[in-house]
Image: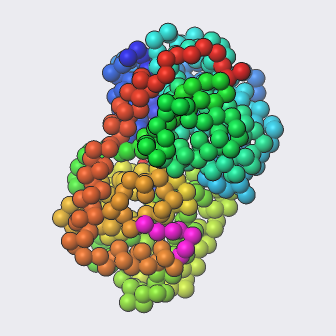
């Protein structure tokens, strides 16, 4: 394999002492980059006041990896990032057409920044390099590179779900989105459902389909060879994992951090249920709080004996829908605490802050139930972290939304429908009353799966498939 060039909206650059940022994806991709040598390119996170072109890219090096960062103008951030990526693509791909705020101005900004990324990448690309582009911010990037003559293998991985055709078609430029993806050699999805939705979009639109020599959906729902817009390319599923063994060790070593000890002391032997999410409407936090209230109503013997700890740091607070959600969650949690609480017991503890990784691992292990109930989620790493953090002798139970990508993989979870608070309430009660034998057997199934399918496997299998993908073809999608 030649050098690897990774492109993502934000780049996890090590600090001045060379320490890597926490998080499995950063660690695994760094390992791949160190092995092959290469470049990680993306936005610095800074915006320049002048609305003209930002200054030159900034280079830094760590071993075999070169980081190349570009600033954006304030207008770029507004239109490309906060606008089109987070107010059109994010809601649309999470099936929230009602929240998608399409504007021609933001769409133009999105394509302009992708063109600028392509211009800035061009001088860095050598003929044998393999290019791996991440997520919905950068869908048009390969097409822009092809227009500039790049013939290298280029792969894409979508971290979020791909929507059903009728939802995608609600955006005025769905055809440009579809067409852009066909400029890649390998398009990676989290689950077979996402890949199936994507292929259905091509078929419904009459612009592409599986090739004659592709496996059919029945033969292999996780792989397809496709032909669309005059190009042949591959689609495949790669469910993202976590650093399972390391996270399990971290949790086992974090049972007596100050945060965990304080938590245990203050619980006084009550059962703990944990929810951990970025404060995002896709995560279903309001529905979860309502389901927890219903659970208390249905199970009066649990009143006073169970606490839900919801940790949800603010996210994207420049987008109005996120600010609205913060107010909604505060009000709902306040309502349940007011109506159901007692002098000596608060049903919901809501923490609107981030928690450090050691404490998070220790808190997962402390909780009898991990309540992970997104309305829609590409994968959901919290579900996997909760499982990895459990004590093998006395594991807790994962209650998981059927609409999280993780539900396709974690067969030992108690699945629920987060739109149905009654059913989710029953799932919580079932999880709390499960026998030790059943808890152990469900946990073992999931842990064995997660140990094999960890973040390292995800990274190496994606890159191996990209290496094997169609020989380079010339030309863009036009
Ligand atoms: P996210 O939507 O950010 O990721 P998720 O997969 O759950 O969602 O990952 C969140 C990460 O942030 C986890 O590692 C978690 O530990 C951490 N985190 C969340 N809340 C935290 C808190 N309060 N304090 C500290 N850490 C916290 C997107 C997609 C997902 C997909 C991932 C990876 O939306 O579907 O799984 O990318 O592809």
Residue that extends furthest to the left in the rendered view of this protein? 393
The residue lying toward the viewer, choosing from 330 and 215, is 215
Residue 300 falls in image quadrant: bottom left
In this picture, is 448 found above or below 19?
below
Task: Verify whether residue 102 appears in magenta.
Answer: no
455 shown above or below 248: above
- Residue 311 visible in rendering: no
Q: Which residue shows up at 23% across the image and 49% down it? A: 249
Q: Is residue 303 above or below residue 444?
A: below
Instruction: Specify the segment rendered in magenta.
Output: 415-421
x 66%, y 48%: residue? 165
Q: Quadrant of the N terminus?
A: top left
- Give the x, y percent position of residue 193: 52, 50
Residue 420 counted in the magenta span:
yes
With 356 as the anchor, is 109 left or right in this view? right
380 on left or right of 56 = left
Q: Residue at x 77, y 32 (%)?
A: 108
Q: Horizontal and vertical percent for residue 315?
A: 57, 51
Q: Where is residue 359 shown, x and y percent of the image? A: 34, 56
Residue 392 seen in render: yes
Quarter-of-image position of residue 9: top right
Residue positioned 62% across, 45% down in the render: 200
Locate the C terminus by quadrant: top right
State how many labels appear: 0
């Amino acid at each position: 394999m030649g050098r690897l060039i990774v492109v993502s909206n934000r780049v996890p650059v090590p600090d001045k002492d060379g320490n890597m940022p926490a998080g499995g994806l950063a660690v695994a991709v760094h390992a791949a980059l160190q092995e092959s040598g290469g470049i990680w390119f993306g936005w610095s996170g800074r915006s320049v006041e002048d609305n003209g072109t930002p200054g030159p890219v900034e280079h830094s090096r760590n071993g075999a990896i070169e980081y190349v960062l570009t600033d954006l103008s304030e207008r770029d951030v507004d239109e490309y990032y906060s606008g089109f990526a987070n107010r059109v693509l994010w809601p649309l791909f999470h099936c929230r057409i009602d929240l998608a705020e399409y504007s021609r101005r933001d769409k133009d900004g999105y394509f302009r920044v992708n063109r600028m990324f392509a211009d800035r990448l061009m001088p860095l690309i050598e003929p044998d390099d393999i290019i791996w582009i991440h997520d919905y911010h950068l869908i048009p990037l390969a097409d822009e590179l092809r227009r500039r003559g790049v013939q290298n293998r280029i792969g894409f991985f979508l971290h979020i779900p791909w929507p059903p055709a009728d939802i995608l078609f609600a955006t005025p430029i769905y055809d440009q989105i579809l067409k852009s993806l066909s400029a890649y050699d390998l398009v990676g999805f989290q689950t077979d459902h996402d890949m199936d939705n994507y292929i259905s979009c091509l078929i419904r639109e009459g612009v592409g389909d599986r090739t004659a020599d592709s496996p059919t959906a029945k033969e292999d729902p996780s792989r397809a060879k496709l032909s669309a817009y005059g190009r042949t390319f591959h689609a495949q599923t790669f469910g993202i994992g976590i650093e399972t063994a390391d996270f399990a060790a971290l949790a086992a070593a974090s049972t007596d951090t100050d945060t965990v000890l304080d938590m245990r002391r203050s619980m006084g032997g009550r059962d703990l249920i944990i929810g951990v999410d970025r404060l995002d409407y896709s995560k279903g936090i309001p529905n979860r709080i309502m389901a927890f209230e219903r659970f208390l109503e249905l199970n009066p013997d649990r009143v006073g004996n169970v606490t839900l700890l919801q940790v949800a740091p603010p996210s994207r607070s420049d987008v109005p829908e996120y600010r609205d959600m913060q107010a909604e969650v505060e009000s709902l949690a306040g309502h349940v605490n007011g109506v159901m609480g007692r002098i000596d017991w608060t049903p919901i503890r809501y923490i609107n802050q981030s928690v450090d990784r050691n404490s998070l691992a220790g808190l997962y292990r402390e909780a009898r139930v991990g309540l992970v109930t997104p309305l829609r989620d590409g994968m959901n790493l919290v579900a996997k972290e909760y499982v990895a953090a459990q004590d093998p002798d006395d594991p807790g139970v994962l209650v998981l939304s059927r609409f999280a990508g993780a539900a396709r993989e974690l067969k030992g979870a108690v699945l629920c429908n987060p739109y149905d608070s009654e059913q989710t309430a029953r799932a919580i009660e079932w999880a709390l009353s499960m026998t030790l034998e059943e808890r152990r057997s469900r946990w073992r199934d999931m842990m064995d799966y997660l140990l094999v399918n960890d973040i390292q496997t995800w990274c190496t299998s994606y890159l191996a498939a990209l290496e094997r993908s169609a020989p380079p073809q010339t030309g863009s999608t036009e």
